[in-house]
Image (cartoon, coloured by chain):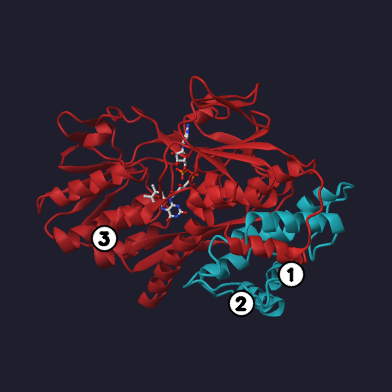
Chain colours: A cyan, B red
Amino acid sequence: MSKSHSLGAALLLAFLGLAACGGSVTDHDDVKNTSIAQLTNRSASLALACAGCHSETSTAVVSLKGYGAEALRDSLLRYRAETDGITVMHRLARGYSDDDIELLANYFDQDKGER
Amino acid sequence: MTQLDRRFLLKAMGLGTASLALPTPAFARAKARIVIIGGGFGGASAAQTLATVLPSSNITLIDANATYTACPFSNLVLGTDRALSAQQFGYDGLRRLGVTVLNTLALDVDPVAQTVTVSDAETIGYDRLILSPGIDMRWNALEGYDEAAAQIFPHAWKAGPQTLLLRQKLDALEDGQPVIMSVPTAPFRCPPGPYERASMIAHYLKTRKPRSKLIVLDAKDSFSKKALFQEAWDEHYPDHLEWRGASDDGTVSRVDAATETIETDFESFDASVINIIPPQKAGSIADRAGVSDGTGWCPIDPLAFESTQQANIHVIGDATIAAPMPKSAFSANLQAKVCAMGVARLVSGLEPQATILSNTCYSFTTPDEAISIAGVYSNENNILMSVSEAGGVSSLSAVKSIRNQEADQARSWFETITSETFG
Ligand SMILES: Cc1cc2nc3c(=O)[nH]c(=O)nc-3n(C[C@H](O)[C@H](O)[C@H](O)COP(=O)(O)OP(=O)(O)OC[C@H]3O[C@@H](n4cnc5c(N)ncnc54)[C@H](O)[C@@H]3O)c2cc1C
């Protein structure tokens, strides 16, 4: 995707005043800032940490693209619940609340079907 | 941020690719001038993220070098056949995103006029400045260790020529001669890094100079993942690695480049290969900008990593005081992204918001085995703190396949983080 595309999309979103899924939107009159609020909402900011290891091309680390909200939620909840789990994901999942797991699951679900 | 992540963001807003073809409504966006000093894991990641969330802003990235040489995995350049070129990345990906990249040294920052000086003739104005200058050595904090001494006793704690110099010295080592490494007290860049390096040098000796041995002189008694490293050393390098802590006369108190000797309180060593990891501080441009404090590091408000000492200047990465987050590439990259989102909000009249951050660092103990440490952090209420139930290190006495898996994950992490950072 080119820069102009992503810019166009962001502007379009702002123009139409679409609501994003998940996460709260700061109350602001300016449509432009509504779009920035969307792009930087809690879902998007939580997902930043995941992107350090998970990408479309990551190999030994699974790609989250098209994972599906349910599968991702179940997987994170399972990691968190397994008290004797020793993987990196077990250690990380223990730091996330139910609400944040829900936000992340929905955030990555938006990419479903693109591959 | 990769193209994929940009697509995530757009799709998360409910935009499919079809809608991208629709005409763009015309109205002005904030033309914020954002200058970033330092194009490493922190600075380059900040530029990537800003180009996405604030695409019409003017983003200028300043780095002294046209090619960045990454430190993670540079210990494998020392101990294995990994080439230094595998560590190197350019800035064309950022340029393609519309970021102005200047390969020059930032000489000064005027936090009042809000300008960065890049030459006698040129200053660049900013609305927000992001500093990710990494570390500088505290020359002479260890008696005798100055820039000239670093040519005799390489630190290799900034990857590049120093890494090659240390490797050349290892290659020239006569089998049977010792190798010495000196490790400082915390805080320093990459807490487990010296011990990964010790492992890689011991591996090198075991396979290429089997009669030689590495002696690690440490100014501390405990260190990151100590039990795990020591377990690996007992198994793999019983004859090739000896570690001495502070209470065992491990603290190096003086070095002498002229005679190629180094001293602890009670002993002196001369060896043809001596790796000094010296005490460190924030990159010196932080001092010029007035964002470092008496510790040599930079205090920040962790919500958007804004300096607590200067308005409109943000500091990320190794230069910050961000404990309990370690000084790692993972941390620098994530802090950059959180900071960029915060900056995008601030220049748009929105408050930065709290989030959950994390860190994962892998360390190789052999070329195909690794161990890890992970942490989860909250910046709620402007306090960076560990989420207590989370994080921790790999299990002791795990089977080899687990160590192999973590090595695979480490390699995957390096590919992902470098492509996310440099495009
Ligand atoms: C041996 C070793 C192994 C490591 N292994 C790992 C690992 O496995 N995992 C991990 O997460 N981390 C690891 N690290 C740590 C990691 O390298 C650092 O934490 C990371 O590079 C910090 O990023 P930064 O942006 O703060 O600084 P840097 O990446 O150092 O970037 C700073 C940049 O700023 C530029 N700069 C500074 N001042 C100026 C100026 N005045 N003008 C212009 N440019 C300037 C420099 O040229 C440099 O490119 C390791 C470090 C070492 C030494």
Mark sitting on residue B147: none
Q: Amino acid at mark 2?
A: Arg
Distance from disc 2 to disc 3, alpha carbons, whole Å, reads 37 Å
Residue beneath disc 2? A115
Distance from disc 3 to disc 1, alpha carbons, whole Å, reads 48 Å
Query: Is any atom of residue B389 visible in this view?
Result: no
Q: What is the tally of numbered marks visible in this picture? A: 3
- Image coords of residue B422 (percent x, y): 50, 53
Label 1 secondary element: helix
Label 2 secondary element: loop
Q: Nearer the viewer, residue A27 or B147?
A: A27
In which quarter of the view is residue A70 placed? bottom right
| Image height of A99 relative to B308, above or below | below
Q: Amino acid at mark 1?
A: Ala
Q: Amino acid at mark 3?
A: Thr
Distance from disc 1 to disc 2, alpha carbons, whole Å, reads 16 Å
Q: Residue at x 26, y 60 (%)?
A: B80
Query: Contact (CB < 8 A) between labels 3 and 1?
Result: no
Q: Residue at x 64, y 47 (%)?
A: B50
Mark 3 crowdedness (10 Å alpha carbons): few <14, some 14-19, many ≥20: some
Label 3 secondary element: loop
Residue beneath disc 1? B18
**Image-based side of B63 in relation to A71, left or right:** left
